[in-house]
Image (cartoon, rainbow, N blue to C red):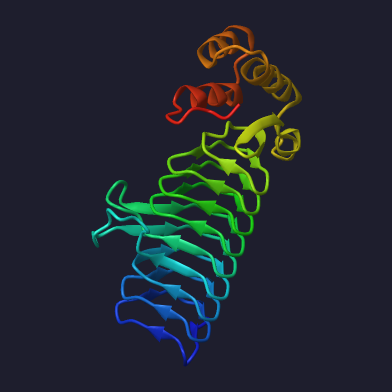
Amino acid sequence: MINTSISSTAKIAAGARLAQDVEIGHYVIIGPEVKIGAGTKIGDHCVIDGDSTIGENCQIFTGAVIGSVPQDSKYKGEKTGLTIGDNNIIREYVTINLGTTASGKTEIGNNNLIMAYAHIAHDCLIGNNTIIANVGTLAGHIVIEDKVILGGLAAVHQFVRIGTLAIVGGCSKVIQDIPPYSMCDGHPARVRSLNKVGLERAGISKDTKSNLKTAFTILFNSGLTIPHALKKVEQEVPASPEVTHLVNFIKHSQRGVCR
C-alpha cells in the first residue's frame, strides 16, 4: 500500500480526511472539513478550506486557493460547499469559492483543465472535459456544459450558460448565453461560426454536422427573431440529439443568447 506523503511544513487541521496516496506539498494549509481522494497531489503553498471535497487523481499546483468563502455581500457564513471531481488539473494560483445558499455549493466535474490564475466564483456548475485558459474569470451562478473551451482572459457574467462543445475566444466579454457547438468571440461575444473542429474531434457524424450548420444559418444569419428562427429550425432541420439540445438550450435561456 502506498502511504500518504505530507510535508512537515504543511498544516492539516484535525478532521480533514485524506485518502491513501495523497501528496501534500510544503506550507499547504488544509481546513477541518476538507476531503481529498486517493492519488491527488497538492502543490506547495496551497490553501484548501471550507466543506470542500476533491476527488481522485487531481493535480493542484502552487498557490491555488480552493474552498474560500464566496465574494458575495449576501453571504453571511452559511453552511455551503464545494465539490471537485476526479482527474482535474488545477494550475498555479487558481481561486475557487464555496457556494452560497442560492444553490448550496459550487461543483466541478471530471477531467477538467483549469489554467493559472483562473477564478471560479460561487455557485458555478462546470461539467466534464472543459478547459478554462489562463485568467479565465467566472462570476457567480455560471453553468458550463461538457467539452467547453474558454479562452484566456475571457470574463463571463453572472448567470450565463455556455453550451457543450462551444469555444470562446480569449479576452471575450460574455454577457449572454453561448450556444452549444459554437465559436464565439468579441466584446461583447458574438457567434462567429459553428465549431467544426470541436465537432470533428467529438466524433459527430457528417450528417449531424451538416444539420447543425443549417440550424446555425437559420438562428444566427437569417435575420429572424429567435422565436421565429427556432420554429423554422424545428420545422426544417432533421432532428438529432445535438439539434434538439441546441434548440432546447436557446428556448430555456434566461439572459438571452449571444448572436
Res 37 visible: no
Position of 186 with respect to 122 (left or right) is: right
Q: Write down the quadrant of residue 115 in the picture.
A: bottom right
Q: Write down the quadrant of residue 13 in the picture.
A: bottom left
Res 5 visible: yes
Position of 167 with respect to 13 (left or right) is: right
Position of 83 with respect to 208 (left or right) is: left
Q: Is residue 259 above or below residue 136?
A: above
Residue ID at (44%, 75%): 47
User: Residue 199, position in %: x, y?
Assistant: 71, 34
Residue lying farthest bottom? 8
Position of 27 with respect to 199 (left or right) is: left
Most foreground residue, 27 or 168 = 168
Residue ID at (65%, 15%): 218
Most foreground residue, 10 or 155 = 155
User: Residue 257, position in %: x, y?
Assistant: 53, 28
Most foreground residue, 255 or 25 = 255
Q: Write down the quadrant of residue 15 in the picture.
A: bottom left
User: Residue 153, position in %: x, y?
Assistant: 62, 54
Q: Is residue 93 above or below residue 237?
A: below
Please tell me how many numbered marks the rendered image carries.
0
Which image quarter holds the C terminus?
top right
User: Residue 8, position in %: x, y?
Assistant: 47, 92
Residue ID at (54%, 21%): 247
Q: Is residue 47 above or below residue 130?
A: below
